[in-house]
Amino acid sequence: DIQMTQSPSSLSASVGDRVTITCQASQDISNYLNWYQQKPGKAPKLLIYDASNLETGVPSRFSGSGSGTDFTFTISSLQPEDIATYYCQQYDNLLSLTFGGGTKVEIK
Amino acid sequence: QITLKESGPTLVKPTQTLTLTCTFSGFSLSTSGVGVGWIRQPPGKALEWLALIYWNDDKRYSPSLKSRLTITKDTSKNQVVLTMTNMDPVDTATYYCAHQRAAAGSFDYWGQGTLVTVSS
């Protein structure tokens, strides 16, 4: 199984701050990496697919980068509505999928 | 537009078998490349992928739960069914079904989720 290590598990930042979350795969997954946002009591929402592609309708302050084993998710300017838990998810040639442990983002 | 909705029991007893149904609209599971997956989330914990079924009836399962899971589809009814055997209190979770776009590993549409509690 491919394991996904996401860090940090939580963070607190001020409105307008740049926020960065990392996800590390236990083996090379090319760019098979997606990012989701989940607000309390809601289903996850796809933000970034294939490591760096912004899903339609998602604000441009969200971005993703990386390939191989190391990936980064960035919010360029944190907004109050971005308070949520963020998850990475890998898909290894569609044979199996794994989610990261999540990062809870709060406002300082 | 694409919508999905999960249905099934809210409470099951330990050792029982759970059967969940995902009823969807806005797409066909006979369209090449499309898939429907199941993901669960225990209260306060992370997401966990369970199973996937593709348009061609190809199926994928979480290795850690494979022996307990079965996923099937009824294309004519626009439904996907997940069964999980030998339920345990640790299986208490919100269970989601989600649409996987063709030739991609991302879930772009999700159901609202259904909370299943395992308790005697």
Image: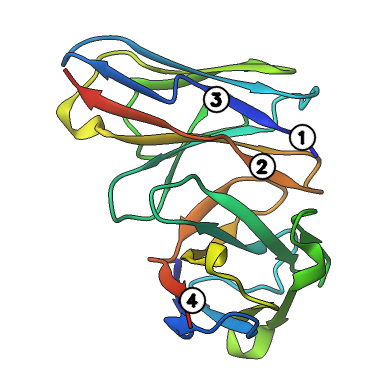
| Cβ atoms at labels 1 and 2 below 8 Å apart | yes
Q: CA distance from mark 3 to mark 4?
A: 34 Å
Query: Chain under label 1?
Result: A
Indicate which disc residue A6 carries. 3
| Cβ atoms at labels 1 and 3 below 8 Å apart | no
Three-letter amino acid code of the residue under disc 1: Ile
- Discs 1 and 2 lie in a common subunit: yes
- At a point 77% along the width and 60% down the height, the residue shown is B61
* Badge 3 or badge 2: first in the primary sequence: 3
Q: CA distance from mark 3 to mark 2?
A: 11 Å
Q: CA distance from mark 2 to mark 4?
A: 26 Å
Q: Secondary structure at mark 4?
A: strand
How far from the left and from the top, in percent, is residue B57? 81, 72
* Badge 1 or badge 2: first in the primary sequence: 1
Viewer-proximal residue among B55 and A33: A33
Indicate which disc residue A98 carries. 2
Q: Which residue is mark 4?
A: B25
Indicate which disc residue A2 carries. 1
Three-letter amino acid code of the residue under disc 3: Gln
Query: Chain under label 4?
Result: B
Left or right of residue B11, residue B19 in this image: right
Three-letter amino acid code of the residue under disc 4: Ser
Left or right of residue B103, residue B57 in this image: right
Viewer-proximal residue among B30 and A28: A28
- Discs 3 and 2 lie in a common subunit: yes
